[in-house]
Image (cartoon, rainbow, N blue to C red):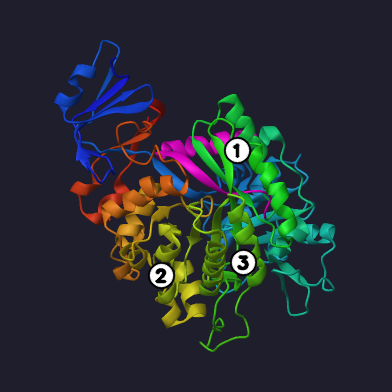
């Protein structure tokens, strides 16, 4: 039987340890039928076989994103998107233009701003009032851990100087104690609960927009890192099921169902019911996401020792554990016993230790369930916790774009962490040398979804636009190119429980990406120049560069 497609004229990097390189690949009925040299596939070429001459360009397994928020990011692209603006004046101009263009919207909602644009100050409600005062405005920060709101939004939510900070959240206040316009973590919900729900048509458009973008970056599968409502974002479960049933969902997606930190074990039953609504088509929801802390920029990442102030002196703040450690142990143990993979958010070193302690407790109670639990972000990691990943068979879900010097790192993170803890950040090299499985994700729409940018920073520990202008960020934590590619292919396939993907191996699904060059041939600082030409899922072309 002839092949559907044959790729010739390699190189092909298979990410298969048994045969990492070849020059020809044949695809039949959506799977890899042959891997080798041209002579190995010649007999599979028939009159209807598409023959693709690689012309020295690199063929790889399709990239997979192990931590991404496509529906949320798609909605942001369709709403008031501040992602490409760089200054406060730019933000306000975008908001004003959007409001003028959408007089029918009862709320102005969107996001994508960053704290660094405001320098040492916080955004204020008065800034938003100056461009929109007749309608409420709700704009999530790029990482969705804070929201910037105007006076009308605070008014509608009944938030004033008498409103207490909720558990797990903080309301920024002015010198007189009045809410100043920024809500952190759980405080976001005080306003978010009043946001109008997007329609199913809105969600379909968001998912379709996001999927096109991800396919254009060579991404063939992903793990949605929060299938639930959070920070004013809607629950995407129904739109995934809808897309899977209709065939619109061409990627394979594993959904991580959200754990509510304000509730207890009574939510395990409903999570089981949500899991049982799938699998449908290419979508499953057999993972639970637990957010254990916040971020250092707003002082909510959970640290063992206190944050530092502007003078470098310890403060009274050590951040916040979203789930009390003993409750976390009980939750993790029960979810593990019910067959859920666990996907954690951990930024601070205390949050990470609490998670590893909970996983250790679950393992002692339940034995090795083989569910491939993984921890995302891993910003501040104590050296003694690195070896625990391997001992507990926990994967490290890394976001490489964060591991570089930029304004956010240098102005907002390092000063509050101090020199010692700053040297513990994003220890990808240490984790790899300890034998830990590395999966990779983007956290898009927090940062770019482009795997090639992530690979570039994982290898160089420098953002591509500032080579030679900023120092290499902790150079001992750099990864080699092969290891970085594996994190975005076989490593993420492991975390996504997609065992017949992630490498170009006979019998695997033909999820493939063709690049415009071979980055192994050039200097590491040129990796980010690489672009995706074609993306295939089960041998079917889902993206071709124009």
Q: Is residue 474 left or right of residue 442?
A: left
Q: Is residue 544 above or below residue 230?
A: above
Quick one: label 3, few (<14), some, or many (20+) residues within 10 Å? many
* Residue lying farthest to the left in this orientation: 39
Residue 455 position in % (x across, y down): 34, 53
Seen at 37% across and 30% down, the residue is 546
Tell me the mark number nearer the camera, choosing from 1 and 2.
2
Nearest to N terminus: mark 1 or mark 2: 1
Residue range in magenta is 204-230
Q: Which residue in the protein does label 2 denote? A: 386
Residue 204 position in % (x across, y down): 63, 33
Element class at badge 1: helix
Element class at badge 3: helix
Camera-nearest residue between 295 and 220: 220
| Residue 236 in view here | no
Element class at badge 2: helix
Seen at 56% across and 87% down, the residue is 314
Quote the CA–CA distance across marks 3 and 1: 36 Å
* Residue lying farthest to the top in this orientation: 47
Q: Which residue in the protein does label 3 denote? A: 329
Q: Which residue in the protein does label 1 denote? A: 206
Tell me the mark number nearer the camera, choosing from 3 and 1.
3
Nearest to N terminus: mark 3 or mark 1: 1
Q: Is residue 423 left or right of residue 1?
A: right
Tell me the mark number nearer the camera, choosing from 2 and 3.
3
Seen at 47% across and 49% down, the residue is 66
């Amino acid at each position: 039987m002839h092949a559907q497609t044959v790729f010739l004229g390699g190189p092909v990097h298979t990410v298969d340890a048994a045969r990492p390189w070849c020059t020809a690949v044949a695809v039949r009925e959506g799977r890899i039928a042959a891997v080798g040299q041209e002579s190995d596939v010649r007999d599979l070429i028939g009159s209807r076989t598409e023959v693709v001459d690689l012309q020295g360009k690199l063929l790889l397994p399709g990239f997979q994103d192990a931590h991404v928020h496509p529906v949320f990011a798609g909605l942001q692209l369709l709403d008031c998107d501040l992602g490409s603006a760089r200054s406060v004046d730019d933000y306000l101009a975008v908001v004003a233009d959007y409001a003028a263009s959408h007089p029918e919207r009862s709320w102005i909602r969107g996001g994508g701003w960053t704290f660094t644009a405001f320098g040492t100050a916080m955004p204020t409600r008065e800034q938003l009032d100056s461009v929109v005062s007749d309608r409420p405005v709700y704009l999530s920060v790029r990482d969705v851990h804070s929201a910037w709101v105007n006076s009308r939004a605070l008014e509608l939510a009944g938030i004033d100087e008498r409103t207490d900070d909720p558990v797990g959240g903080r309301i920024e206040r002015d010198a007189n104690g009045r809410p100043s316009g920024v809500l952190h973590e759980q405080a976001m919900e005080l306003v978010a609960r009043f946001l109008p729900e997007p329609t199913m048509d809105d969600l379909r458009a968001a998912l379709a927009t996001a999927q096109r973008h991800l396919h254009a970056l060579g991404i063939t599968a992903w793990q949605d890192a929060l299938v639930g409502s959070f920070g004013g974002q809607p629950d995407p479960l129904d739109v995934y099921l809808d897309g899977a049933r209709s065939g619109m969902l061409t990627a394979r997606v594993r959904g991580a169902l959200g754990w509510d930190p304000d509730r207890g074990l009574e939510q395990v039953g409903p999570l089981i019911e949500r899991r049982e609504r799938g699998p449908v088509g290419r979508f499953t929801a057999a993972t639970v996401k637990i957010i254990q802390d916040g971020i250092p920029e707003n002082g909510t990442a959970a640290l063992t020792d206190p944050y530092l102030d502007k003078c470098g002196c310890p403060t009274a703040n050590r951040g916040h554990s979203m789930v009390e450690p003993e409750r976390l142990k009980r939750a993790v143990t029960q979810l593990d016993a019910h067959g859920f993979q666990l996907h954690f958010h951990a930024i601070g070193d205390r949050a990470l230790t609490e998670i590893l302690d909970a996983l250790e407790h679950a393992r002692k109670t339940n034995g090795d369930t083989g569910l491939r639990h993984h921890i995302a972000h891993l910003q501040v990691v104590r050296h003694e916790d690195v070896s625990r990943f391997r001992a507990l068979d926990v994967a490290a879900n890394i976001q490489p774009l964060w591991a570089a010097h930029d304004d956010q790192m240098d102005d907002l993170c390092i000063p509050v962490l101090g020199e010692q803890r700053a040297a513990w950040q994003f220890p990808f090299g240490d984790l790899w040398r300890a034998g830990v499985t590395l999966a990779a994700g983007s956290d898009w729409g927090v940062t770019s979804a482009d795997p090639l940018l992530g690979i570039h920073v994982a290898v160089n520990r420098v953002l591509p636009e500032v080579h030679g202008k900023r120092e290499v960020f902790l150079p001992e934590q750099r990864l080699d190119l092969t290891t970085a590619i594996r994190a975005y292919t076989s490593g993420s396939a492991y975390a996504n429980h997609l065992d017949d993907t992630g490498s170009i191996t006979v019998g695997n699904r033909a999820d493939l990406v063709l690049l415009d060059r071979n980055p192994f041939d050039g200097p590491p600082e040129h990796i980010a120049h690489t672009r995706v030409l074609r993306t295939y899922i089960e041998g079917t072309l889902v993206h071709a560069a124009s």
